[in-house]
Image (spheres, rainbow, N blue to C red):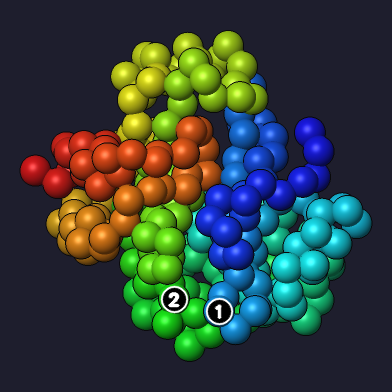
Amino acid sequence: MTSSLEVFARDALWLRDYPVRLGGARFNARMTVIRLASGQVLVHSPCAFDDRLAGQVAALGPVAAIIAPGNLHWLHVRSCQQAFPEAQTYVCPGVDERAKRLRFDFVLGDEAPRLWADELAQVALCGTRVMREVAFFHRPSRTLILADLVENFTPATPGTNLLLRVVFRGLGMWNRPGPAPEYRFAWGDRARVREAMERILEWDFDRVILSHGDLITGDARRRVARAWRNILR
């Protein structure tokens, strides 16, 4: 896999897929790079950085923030910190407890930091026993940016192996957007989760960047609501 960035929204959003292995399953995750109107750059759910990728990201502007948006999306933060030592690191609640040796500057919540508050809104979803995540809405491009709240694996999704396809078919999630399995089986405070999802669905987004699976570029709000229909009832 090449260390190249793909343009998603001109002058604002770039993507880069990278491989993941989990319990024998193989699939891709996705990094999102966001350039603010100020020219400063945010790296969301970073992958492992090499010199080429670091140069491509640096060419977009000064990297001001590294964001670990979910409990399972911090593993390459150190690599990104090494590439951009001046950037501040923001982590999802729970990462501060799980990644004991990870250096970070701030724990994210529902209130966006001043650095990106004019362009990005956010909601912290922390009502499950295992999974926590901070969802982001990029207002200029009307794009929802997620980690594991919705996954969308289909026959067209690159990077998946047979085990993942078998598991997701068994869960009824193959070719059908849905929350990560960890959300489905580890509920805690459902009312708190429902309130957070309702706030997310109030955003006026028409596209979704997912960390896992195919991007959602049409009928986005209805498809996200449908993915979470059981908890939203």
**What is the x, y in percent for residue 200?**
27, 60
Find residue 195 and report its horizontal and vertical position in percent: 18, 61
Image side of residue 127 versus residue 28, left or right:
left
Residue 188 shows in the view: yes
Quarter-wise, where is residue 11 in the image?
Answer: bottom right
The residue furthest bottom is 114
Indicate the quadrant containing the N terminus: top left, top right, bottom left or bottom right. top right
Crowding near pointer 1: few (<14 within 10 Å), some, many (20+)? few
Task: Count up the numbered dots.
Answer: 2
Quadrant (top left, top right, bottom left, bottom right) of the C terminus: top left
| Left or right: residue 84 compared with residue 46 | right
Is residue 224 among the parts visible in the rendering? no
* Observer-nearest of 65 and 24: 65
Q: Position of residue 148 (x, y in %)?
A: 44, 45
Which residue carries the number 2 mark? 119
Q: Which mark is residue 37?
A: 1
Residue at position x 66%, y 31% from top?
Answer: 21
Mark 1, mark 2: which one is toward the viewer? 1
